[in-house]
Amino acid sequence: MAALLDRAHKMAGSQLDGVEQAAKELAVLCGDSSTASAARRVVLGRLEAGGDRVDRQVASLLRRAIELGAGLWAWDNTKPLP
């Protein structure tokens, strides 16, 4: 997950031309919803502790990556909520 968060911070710290493309790249790097959700929780924790503009951008990119990933990731082994 460290490599994923590093890449997300590099994307967010630069001038993004294509947010959708960046989010899609993150979705592919995540590989599944649990990794993406865990990464987003880490970033949201940073925001609660007083994160900066880059952390807010990373949180937005990861949220969009989760949305885009829903169409990419396999959902065969997911368990329904009780």
Image: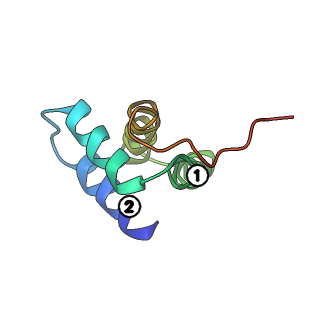
Residue 23: image quadrant is top left
N-term mark: 2 or 1: 2
* Dot in front, 2 or 1: 1
Position of residue 51 in the picture relative to residue 7 (left or right):
right
Residues at marks 2 and 1, CA–CA distance in whole angstroms: 13 Å
Q: Which element type, helix, strand or loop, lies under badge 1?
A: helix
Image x and y of residue 4, in percent: 38, 61
Q: Which element type, helix, strand or loop, lies under badge 2?
A: helix
Q: Which mark is residue 34?
A: 1
Q: Pick whichever, 81 or 48, lies toward us.
A: 81
Q: Which mark is residue 24?
A: none
For the residue carrying disc 1, how many other residues have a C-alpha within 10 Å: few (<14), some (14-19), or many (20+)? few
Which residue is rendered at x = 58% and y = 51% of the image? Answer: 34
Task: From this view, report whether residue 25 is shown above or below residue 20.
Answer: below
Mark 2 lies on residue: 4
| Three-letter code for the amino acid on which mark 2 is drawn | Leu
Image x and y of residue 66, in percent: 46, 37
